Every structure is written in structure tokens, then in C-alpha cells.
Amino acid sequence: MTTSAVELSLPRGPLSTFVLARLHGATVPRPSVVTSDALGDDDLQLALHLCYELHYGGLPGVPDETEWDIELLSFRAELERCVERDLFALVGPPVGADDVRSALPALVADDDGPSLSRWMLENGSIEQMTEFVLHRSAYQLKEADPHSWAIPRLPRAAKAGLVEIQAGEYGVERPEHVMHSELFAATMRELGLDDRPNAYLDELPGTTLATGNLASYFGLHRRWRGALVGHLSVFEMTSVEPMGRYSAALERMGASDAARRFYDVHVMADAVHERVAVDAMAGPLADEEPALAADILFGARAVLAVEGRFAETLLAAWSAGASSVRREVLVI
């Protein structure tokens, strides 16, 4: 993975302008947070992404102590209240179930969102696949990291299940110990893309940023540890077939084996992880902390809905013969 820094993003409105000013050490008036669609708002989702990045690898030129800037944390909380409001409006508030182990597969089976992977396999071009990879870079280049926030917050059995999944994501299960994020970076390079974190941040619309921000939102709040487990469970339960389709699509497009490896590895790993997610992580968490069953299912519904909106945005653009990114991308 390339290690040189990228420039900070360009602002998209008053919210991201305020955050960027604080990151640069400037003082500007704090704007009111007003939005009717927090999950799709380009300005809000960029502002939230920048705030969250401080808790991961940081941002170029921004001092580490800015992670705990009181004004930024207070502003982030205001943004998150809008996100929570709209999540509740989209999927409803947390509601429990008698058996999480059966409720999770039922939620996945009932999901009628569009299939990006099937569309890509049957209709996609190499240019559209490259755009798809670009969209996914905001999350995949730090794959597993948001879910690792839950490790110290879970009771014994659920913690062991999560650690088993995370070990695979970080490459411990493979002799060469290559992390999935590193495999994704290799796919980006094979497709002529810049694999530096946030290299394409200006190209990503709010519906894309919301997919990664959702995991960070759940992960950075202990009160949403159950939702984070539900989020990860759905990721693992809905991975095998789509990843196989993306690999097959790349093969049809003439892409290299190295470009396909990220997807091929997930087909193998997630066949195991989907069982672990339900039987060794989500189920035991509901057993040990029954009050969290509702949150587990809320996280599952939330990720299905947010991913569905992401897919709809891309498919609408491609079906109209347009690009799905915010501006033209120069491949390297």
C-alpha cells in the first residue's frame, strides 16, 4: 500500500467547512446542522467521515491531539444525532426478538434490496467495476478496524467469536499473514487506482460515505456494541455469493488474478465466518446480554438499508449511462 499522504478533502458545504477549518487549526463560526436526509447528505457525511478518521489512521497534517478536540467531538455528536434520527425513520427503532440466531437469517432472506454483484456480473464494464472499487475504498482500506472497537466491550463468548472473525480479516489464518485491507489495496493497484487512504474522498457521494460511517458510528459508541455485532453479522452472512460474482465479473472483464484475489479470499473465509457470526458471536451476545438482542437486529436492519441505498445510487447512475462518482477520476 502506498504510504505518502494525500491532501485533505475539499469542503462541500458549511458542515464540512467547519470541520476542515478546525482540522487546520482555524476558528470559524459553528454552523447549524439542518438536513432532511442525513444518510445521503454529501456535506454531513463528509464532515462525519473526517471526524471519524481522527480515530483511525489520522489525517495528513492534523496533530494527533485533535482526536480529542472538544468542539469537534461536540459537533460530531450533533451530526450523529441526525444520523440516528434518520436511521430510526428508515428502519425503525430497536425491537427485540426471542431468537437472534433465527431472526438474523430471516432478516437477510427478506431483504429485497438491489444486487450490485449480480448487476456487475451480468452487465458491468471494467470502468464501472473500477468505480465500484473506488467507492468501496473508504471502508475496505480499513476493513475490520471499525468492528474491532467491540472487542473489549463484549462478554467472553461473544468476544471470542468476534476475535475469530477478526483474525481472518487481519490475515492471521493465512500463512503469508496478508490482511484483507492489503488485498483490497492490491485490487486497486491492478485496476489503475491510487491505493492511499482517502485518495478519492472528493469523488465519493454521501450515500457511499454513509456505508463506512455507519460502522464507525456503531463502533465508537459502547452503547451501540450490539448494533455493531449485528452489522458485522450481516456483512459476513451476505458476503460469499456477492464476492464470487465480483470475482467472476472481473474474470469476464479480463482482469488479472491479483485483481480478483481479494474477492476469492472472501469467498473462502466468509463461508466460515458467516456461521461464526451467528452461532459464536451474535447468538452468545444475546444469551449473555439479552437486552442487546434488539440492538443486534437494529444494526442488521441498518446495514441492509444503508447498503441498499448505496446500491440504488450506483445502479441509477449506470443505468442512465452516467458515472457514479462526483467528478471524473484519473486512473494512474
Image (tube, grey):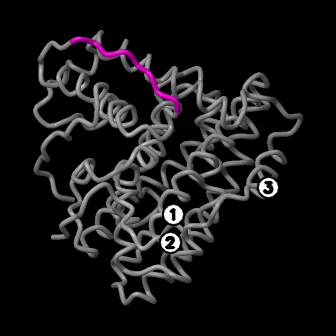
Q: Which residue is pictured at 42% across the width and 74% down the height?
A: 321
- Which residue of the protein is positioned furthest toward the right in this rendering? 98
Q: Which quadrant would residue 261 be assigned to in this image?
A: bottom left
In this image, 96 relative to 31: left or right? right
Q: Is residue 32 magenta?
A: yes
> What residue did someone put label 3 on?
110
Q: Is residue 263 above or below residue 75?
A: below
The kind of residue tagged 1 is: Ala
In what element is the residue under mark 1? helix
Q: Which quadrant would residue 50 be assigned to in this image?
A: top left
Circle 2 packing at 10 Å, graded few (<14), some (14-19), many (20+), is: few
Circle 1 packing at 10 Å, graded few (<14), some (14-19), many (20+), is: few
Q: Earlier in the sequence, mark 3 or mark 1?
A: 3
The kind of residue tagged 3 is: Asp
Residue span colored magenta: 29-36
Asked if marks 1 and 2 touch (Cβ < 8 Å), the reply is yes
Q: Is residue 323 magenta?
A: no
Q: Which residue is pictured at 79% across the width and 31% down the height?
A: 287
- Which residue of the protein is positioned furthest toward the front in this rendering? 320
The kind of residue tagged 2 is: Ser
CA distance separating discs 1 and 2: 5 Å
Q: Earlier in the sequence, mark 2 or mark 3?
A: 3
> What residue did someone put label 1 on?
316
In this image, 252 relative to 108: left or right? left
CA distance separating discs 3 and 1: 22 Å
* Secondary structure that dominates the magenta span: loop
In what element is the residue under mark 2? helix
In what element is the residue under mark 3? helix
The spot of residue 258 in percent (x, y) is: 33, 78
Name the foreground residue: 64 vs 242: 242
